[in-house]
Amino acid sequence: MGNNKWLKFISIAMGVLLVVSLIMNNSMAKKVTLLENRIEEIIGLQYSISSNLDNQTNHITNVLQEIWEQNTWLGHVEMVDIRSTEHGEEAIIEWQVRELGLDSEVYFHYVFGNGDNFNTVHAELKQDGLFQVAIPFELEVEPNWMVSLYADEENSTTNVQEEGSKHSTALRYYISMKDLDGNVKSGDIEILDINDLGTEKYGHIEASVHLYNEKIDVTLSHFYELNNEIVHASLLQYENNQLLEEIDMKLDHVDESMNMKMFHLFGLEKYDDMRLVMQVEYKDGSTYQKEIY
């Protein structure tokens, strides 16, 4: 009798364990299935991302290849000089044509601003595929000025900087080549910022005004290009609009390796209604003024 109860208990326990085992196996199988599905989703997502990246890479490569094929016949276009004529200023622009056909004609097309009516200039062959044009422009070029004011007040220094005015005009251009059969090859439209023309010709001027104890020190630093440096600098002292005196500034430092000159004027007496105007004269005879205080 006791043995039968014991066997019955073991049978029930085994049945319970079997049911629990089946439930656990079923749950585990579902988790494995979910995991497999998730892995497949991740693999599919990775494949999709990889495929998209490959497509984008191929597209970018094709675009770059097309751009390279379109422009490989043209070298870098650069402005090499600015010269004055009786009609105004001219920008001298050069570039190299790498695939110049026999008796081919090369043209430079340009327009100022956002217009659509391009002017066309027949380019001059200088040597071995090097072409040049002179482009007239009416924009008044001037140095690029930066004025800094330093004021010592109760052992503290205030620094105020003013950038010189800049023009927003740009030169849009493209280059074309026409062969003997009448076939025309054109480059892309590019932009040359006219704001840089003044800096190219007259350089960058930094004027520093230092106020302390009713005294004023003035320093002028000129960073120049195209061998057109400042040869004389002076300070015009005004009381309101009345000119009181013109004082020459002293040249105290020249660094030819950096194309830089520095002038200074120390110990000016400060007075009411004071105005200071910097005047500079260039090697080419041009003069410019800038109010600095």
Image: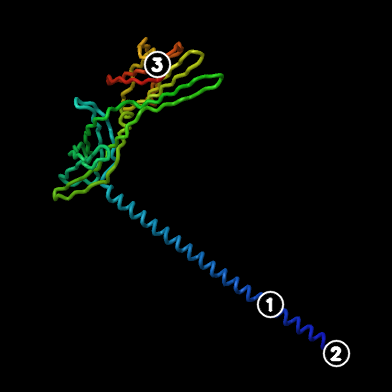
Looking at this view, name the residue that lies furthest to the bottom.
Answer: 1
**Colour convention:** rainbow
Task: Mark 2 or mark 1: name the one nearer the start of the chain.
Answer: 2
Residue 198 placement (x, y as % from top left): 31, 28
Which of the 4 image quadrants contains residue 19?
A: bottom right
How many numbered callouts?
A: 3
List the residue tagged with mark 1: 21
List the residue tagged with mark 2: 1
Residue sitting nearer the eye, 150 or 100: 150
Task: Check disc 1 and give the amino acid type.
Answer: Ser
Disc 3 to disc 1, C-alpha distance: 98 Å
Task: Check disc 3 and give the amino acid type.
Answer: Arg
Disc 2 to disc 3, C-alpha distance: 124 Å
| Label 2: few (<14), some (14–19) or many (≥20) C-alpha neighbours in 10 Å | few
In the rendered image, the vertical position of residue 111 relative to residue 153, given as above or below: below
Disc 2 to disc 1, C-alpha distance: 30 Å
Residue sitting nearer the eye, 77 or 28: 28
Residue 275's tag is 3
Q: Is label 3 or label 1 in front?
A: 3
Residue 47 placement (x, y as % from top left): 46, 63
Q: Is residue 32 left or right of residue 221?
A: right
Looking at this view, name the residue that lies furthest to the top.
Answer: 244
Helix, strand or loop under label 3: strand
